[in-house]
Amino acid sequence: MASHDNIGDFLTIIRNASNARKDSCSASWSNIREGIVKILKDNGYIADFAVSGEKAEKKIEITLKYVGGVPAITQIERVSKPGRRLYYSCSDIPRVLGGMGISILTTSRGVLTDGDCHKNKAGGELICKVW
């Protein structure tokens, strides 16, 4: 049975737009996608985002960030996949480039970064790593 990885596709949209030096990109909306984009904005990886549309036609418009012409997102990598889910307790969450990047996890308290998981003592599914 085939499965579809919506989060992986979303991360690929961001990665491809960033590598192509686009000003912005858009994707369909979901709660988890909005949570991921909020974290990327709070940590300075994207310039801004906006949610538009109604109910089933909602879209997320992401304005990408560049520092001196170089994308702020060097790499965004999907970790947990539909075929292999990876869960970590707060003390076992792997560090990204020795703390230079962030991990994004989905927890019972919402979508959080690795640092927020340590503060809240929450573990969860490791969605992706960003640096």
Image: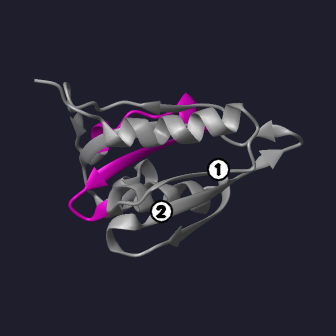
Q: Is residue 110 above or below residue 25?
A: below
Residue that label 2 marks: 59
* In the image: residue 58, left or right of residue 52: left
Locate residue 52, reporting x and y percent. Answer: 51, 72
Assess whether residue 107 is covered by the magenta stretch: yes
Which three-letter amino acid code belongs to the residue tagged 2?
Answer: Lys
Quadrant in the picture for residue 107: bottom left
Residue lying furthest bottom in this view? 54
Residue drawn where x is 25% and y is 43% of the image:
125
Assess whether residue 88 is covered by the magenta stretch: no
Residue that label 1 marks: 45
Q: Residues within 10 Å of mark 1 (few under 14, many from 20)?
A: some
Local secondary structure at mark 1: loop
Which three-letter amino acid code belongs to the residue tagged 1?
Answer: Tyr
Is residue 101 in sight in this rendering? no
- What span is in magenta? 91-110
Q: Is residue 59 above or below residue 69?
A: below
* In the image: residue 20, left or right of residue 110: right
